[in-house]
Image (cartoon, grey):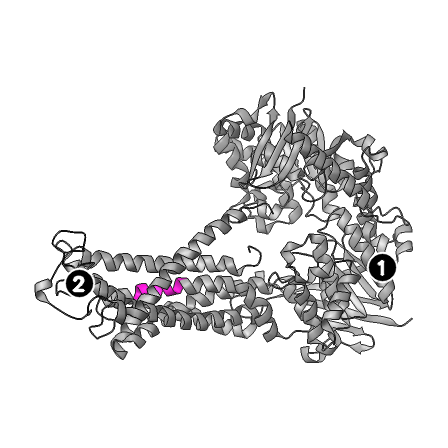
Amino acid sequence: MSYLEIDRLSVRLKGGGPLLRRVSLQVAAGEVRGLVGESGAGKSMIGKAVLGILPRSTEITAGRIVLDGVDLLTLPPAERRRRIGASCALIPQDPLTALNPSRRIGPQITDRLVDILGWPRAKAEARAQELLAEVHIPDPERVMRSYPHELSGGMRQRILIASAFAAEPKLIVADEPTTALDVTVQKQILKLIKEMQERHGTALLFVTHDLGVVSKVCQSLSVLYAGLVVEDCAVRDFFRAPGHAYSAALLAATPKYTDAEASLTPVPEAVIAAVRAEVADADRRAQHG
Amino acid sequence: MADLYEVTDLRLSLADMTRKPLFGAAPRLEILKGMSFTIPQGAVMGIVGGSGSGKSTLGRALVRLLEPSGGSVRFDGVDITHLDEAALRPLRRRFQMIFQDPMSSLNPRHRVGTLIAEPLKLHGFDDVSGRVARALDHVGLPAGFAARYPHELSGGQRQRVGIARAIALEPAFILADEIVSGLDVSSQAQVLNLLEGLVRELGLTLAFISHDLSVIRRLCSRVMVLHHGVIVEDRTTADLFDSPQAAYTRELLDAIPLPDPDQVWA
Amino acid sequence: MLDGRGSVKRRAGARLWLSAGWLSLLVLAAVLAPWIAPKDPLAQDLFLGRLPPFWVAGAEPGYYLGTDSLGRDVLSRILYGARLALIVALVAGSVTCLLGAGLGLMAGYLRGWVDVLISRFIDIWMAFPPVLFSILLIAVIGPGLGSIILAIVIIDWTRFARVVRAEAMAQGAMDYVASARVAGRGRLGIMLREILPNVLPTIVVLLTLEMGIAVIVEAILSFVNLSISTDDPTWGGMIAEGRAAVHQAWWVLVFPLITLFLTVLSFSQLGEGLKDRFDPVLR
């Protein structure tokens, strides 16, 4: 049985249009699933829905989010928050804004352990230092006492990764964690995420627009367009032969430095029209039950 | 073919305001540490490097948004290194720039038409509205977009407005600073194809700053790799990708995740 | 876009109309006071002292909101008091805005020695205790409309300057400013055409806030009898008088107080509402 199952989840803007259209996907324990799509496709929304941090201007209109056998959407808010806090975590996109600039690093990592999980402070601090060493940060003690602006972008992302794994979550949502990083730093961070994920056996929902990254980190993926899942398959199958025309078009539009003659073809109009028609169909079906 | 840009031992340092003492000047941070290169007319020159490499600073020095601290920059034979604003103004329409962030590079309070027309009026062009319409047409945007505000456009469309604004002045040279970094892969492809077409059609010389070597390969005829304010490699695209010489270049190439699960990516 | 802009627009609409409505009413009252005021605001009649408002027993017809200890009509005095309040608000507000925003814009965009000079000037100026400063000023120059306005400008221009400077600095770092430089625009042109329109919403809010503050400052000054020296009614003066007789004639205190409150509130809400109107992104 999968650890996370999203079943026909629909989200829309309050008083506005749909953002997620009956999204279904599954993540097994310890599995890394990629969520790909262009900006606005809704891949971030899914992660936020699972973590219970959807923007206030949106609302869930249908569907289930089943975490470890329990449908989060049927729980009272406090219970839902508690469950999510105990078993999920987030690796956010921007290491700069994700850390509080006026607090030292140490408390920012240990807060969760102390306040939410009730650990004694000494235990939390020891764990934090362990984690910083695990993510290959030299001199963890000094880093714990530093402020975010005193550290580099790559180091801040490592700290966020360490924070995410701190309470041994079963599921982590990584929301474009390397988009803001240099390509050489990105490689280190991706390898680190993979290493940590394998070591701790954590399931990972990996949101990205970069198909190259997907091929390195994920085992399965879901492709989104305008809130609709248009393809859901294993990574190997996807790159060998994408099933959906839109996926194939995305691949064709991705530049590869190894291919001198590659032409960058934007997604053809015909493909866009076809996938838009699919979206309209889905909407029609949803309206008529 | 003549060189449009001739850069010799370019140095640029900025005041490090985080270390400024209470009285006295802040210590200087050397960003460009002595660069020499040329950009031939008609070339598409890629400038690659990580953050902190100085590539953005180099770009801004080339269009004189920043004044070099040492060395010289010659544009079409004219030494523009230390010219003041008054002397630069007539030259400015010949070297233009397109910026990275489509959100902040267009004044949110001006309509698209005004944004493109302003520089034209400044340099005394005639038939401003005609030129605006032609510029929009060149970048594949409908003429009606002139009445829109930037926030009504998508990221890719905003970048195209930035391109229209740059080409409207009929410059000889355009600096594109990471202009596709914030875009979808599909919008990215559109903008790059557009740029390629314009370079051919309008006979432009282009300097393309990017951190993405895959994009560079596609677009550029020459590539310069920067690392910590120094040029580590400056060769034709084919040579660079076939046999990268600098260790840093190899590091960059090795780090790129290709959309291929079988790639050896250790 | 995924945000609450829709609801912000709805709220802004109501806010704008209500505040603009009250302020328009006030302007009308001030302008037309000589014609619409039921009684002469200065006329005293001790036999008609402390009459209650019309809905309370013992009221005299024609004195809708009652009278004060000296028999003067409260409503008429409030209407005439609006004149002073509005003049002070408009003049003091505008002068403070021009001075403060102007200096702040220059300091924030031009930076360099201009910024150093203006910022140090602001720092030194703010080191003087403001209220003391203005009381001293009035003591030296003497009370009067000009002094009040001068006092407000002196105290508050630095607030404008600081905030506008910060905004101008932030906008100055944006790429669209660099783009204007690449196009060849000069610094003055950039300041006025690129930076100013983007700083305008902030300035509008500060201006209307300042107007509200000006009204309060005037009221405080007239409360302590440091305002204009004639017998012309002022809201602050009425509140001061009303305070003495609050147990016997609560209406003498309450009505000017409510008017003052609504006026200041309207100014600040007007600013918020206008700011949203000015912003093409929210339109």
Q: Residue furthest left?
A: C47
**Magenta region, residue range:** C209-217
Chain label for disc 1: B
When the figure is inspected, residue A11 is found, relative to residue C191, above or below; the finding is above
Quadrant housing residue A34: top right
The residue lying toward the viewer, choosing from C239 and B89, is C239
Q: Name which quarter of the figure residue C190 lies in.
A: bottom right
CB under 8 Å between callouts 2 and 1? no
Quarter of the figure that contains the N terminus of chain B: bottom right
Q: Is residue C138 magenta?
A: no
Co-location on one chain, circles 2 and 1: no
Location of the C terminus of chain B by quadrant is top right
Q: Which residue is mark 1?
A: B197
Q: From where the camera sits, is residue B53 visible?
A: no
Camera sees residue A120: yes
Look at 56% across and 29% down and name the residue there. A84
For label 1, the SS is helix
Q: Where in the figure is residue A42, as x and y percent of width and height?
A: 66, 39
Judge from the rendering whether residue C86 lies leftward or rightward of residue A238; answer left or right.
left
Question: Residue at coordinates 35% horizontally, 66% vertically from top-left?
Answer: C27
Residue depicted at x 69% and y 28%: A25
Residue C167 lies left or right of residue C85; in this view the side is right
The amino acid type, in three-letter code, at marker 1 is Gly
Residue C122 percent coordinates (x, y): 43, 70
The vertical placement of B225 against B129, above or below, is above
Q: Residue at x 44, y 63 (%)?
A: C206
Q: Which mark is residue C241?
A: 2
On screen, residue C91 versus residue C186, left or right, reads left
- Please name the predominant secondary structure of the magenta segment in the image: helix
| In front of the other: B130 or A100 | B130
